[in-house]
Image: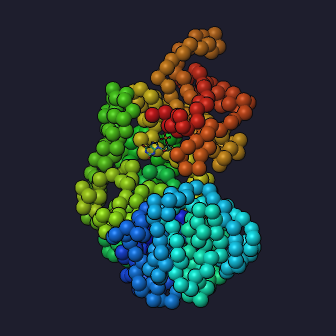
Amino acid sequence: SILIVDFGSQVTQLIARRVREAGVYSEIAPYNAAEAAFERMKPKGIILSGSPASVPEDGSPRAPQCLFDSGLPILGICYGQQVMSHQLGGEVRPGHETGEGGEFGRAFLTVTEECILFDGLWQVGERHQVWMSHGDKVTRFAPGFRIVATSDGAPFALIADDERRYYGTQFHPEVAHTPDGAKLIANFVHKVCGLSGDWTMAEFRATKIAEIREQVGTGRVICGLSGGVDSSVAAILIHEAIGDQLTCVFVDHGLLRLNEREQVESLFRDHYNIPLVVVDAEERFMAGLAGVTDPEKKRKFIGAEFINVFEEEAKKIGGADFLAQGTLYPDVIESVSFTGGPSVTIKSHHNVGGLPERMNMKLVEPLRELFKDEVRALGRELGLNDQFVGRHPFPGPGLAIRIPGEVTKERCDILRKADAVYLEEIRNAGLYDAIWQAFAVLLPVRTVGVMGDGRTYDSVCALRAVTSVDGMTADIYPFDAAFLSRVATRIINEVKGINRVVYDYTSKPPGTIEWE
Ligand code: XMP
């Protein structure tokens, strides 16, 4: 395995991901817990991460000396390179002293000497794109090192000490903007550390199951299901680990899509045999939403009421020591807290924020290290079908934020039907997987129409479909006109209450994906 020592870089998890992609198991440990992790894991290699800190500054973090004493290969990335150079007798100077202000963004380096990291990849004399993000830099490398690649802003872009098997990069090989970075990291773990690269998602599953058993012991776990991929995969994995010590709770707030509740019931109860409590809370939510039109008030009410319902159920079930969540890496905002020691700060997950503290429960979050596509791969590994793991994201507040104006059961029913027609047509056209998210919106606007010989005066339905990689930015999906008119005709004919359909042509930014 590989031990990744985290100095607080925002992209440390990408290092872990690249190591996983190279088929090797890794664990991340904060720098001040790295010695314990090292002794427990007995790794075959070490990677030192980047950091927002500055090596020349008093109190900035250092790598534990035991790592250098171990005789194992070390790859230092950015701050990792600087701290390694500093601790081994080189010199690092802050950007303001060298007068060069650092480098941020795309840079090109030139390969000056051969190096094992370049095997099958780079030749001497070639230029390659890399991603830099540093203020400080190494100004004198430690004894034993040589330069193998340079860039204009970083003369020591890549340094190597082949005897001790120490390597340092000023750039970030773990990010996508360093196109060959994944291969450099793979060369480090395979060729330098001698690891074979046969680790798979199946082993991730086995490792996590062992970890969950150890963490939970004979305790009881409650997991809130949303119907989405993340909480489902977390629940199935935890059930595999501890069986019926797990109870899942699914709150039907009446803001779900057509047949969603039935699908969850059949998947969990019938297929996986997982204890499942379904709470029918539609009336409560509709009553609380009556007269509410402000989007933020809707969200706040739904979030708070969800916690109330969940807490009541948890009390009924009784004796739960743990709350399971499908938190993914992008939900984890800060990996190392410099002020609070090795503790880890997380963003509270949308649906149950505050609940664990209130009920004195501990968290079980087996997907914390994974990215969305890895969760999907794990879902497949656990036997979920492609259609399920490929589901579009669905927001916690559900249809409420797709019904601008007042939310009523009647309007939810209308929207559910229109949305189902739209999604059915998208699946039939084979477009579902090319789209990040597609849904219908029911507008609080009525327009005049004519159907048969009669006048109609009904609501407008807007269709939305976007492509995106992470939901942060999005483009509209360019359906052809024939597709859109087919959907519009079906919705107007089949859904009573809608007599006009429009397509939303707004990208994000300036729009958001949801309408509220
Ligand atoms: P926006 O509308 O902000 O949405 O562009 C970006 C992504 O986040 C989802 N979303 C939510 N998910 N609770 C959630 O769990 C929410 O309150 C929420 N609001 C937006 C949205 O569906 C899209 O995928």
Image height of 172 relative to 299, above or below: below
- Residue 490: give x, y in percent of width and height: 65, 29
Which image quadrant is residue 277 in? Answer: bottom left
> What sort of colour scheme is used for the picture?
rainbow
- Report x, y in % for residue 72: 52, 86
* Closest to the observer, 11 or 381: 11
- Which quadrant holds the C terminus? top left
Determine whether, in the image, residue 278 is placed left or right of residue 420.
Answer: left
> Which quarter of the picture shows residue 202?
bottom right
Nearer to me, 332 or 428: 332
Figure check: 454 above or below 265: above
Whether residue 431 is visible, yes or no, is: yes
Of 144 and 192, which appears nearest the observer?
144
Q: Determine the residue positioned at 73% across, 72% down.
A: 122
Find residue 99 and report its horizontal and vertical position in percent: 50, 59
**Tally of numbered tags:** 0
**Residue 222 in view in this figure:** no
- Residue placed at 74% from the left, 74% from the top? 124
User: Could you tell me which residue is drawn at 58 percent across and 42 percent down?
Assistant: 474
Image position of 72 with respect to 285: above or below: below
Which picture quadrant has residue 407? top left
Q: Residue at x 37, y 67 (%)?
A: 57
Q: Does 384 sit left or right of 408 as displayed?
A: right
Query: Which residue occupies the foreground of this view, 447 or 173?
Result: 173
Across and down, in percent, residue 392 comes to: 56, 47
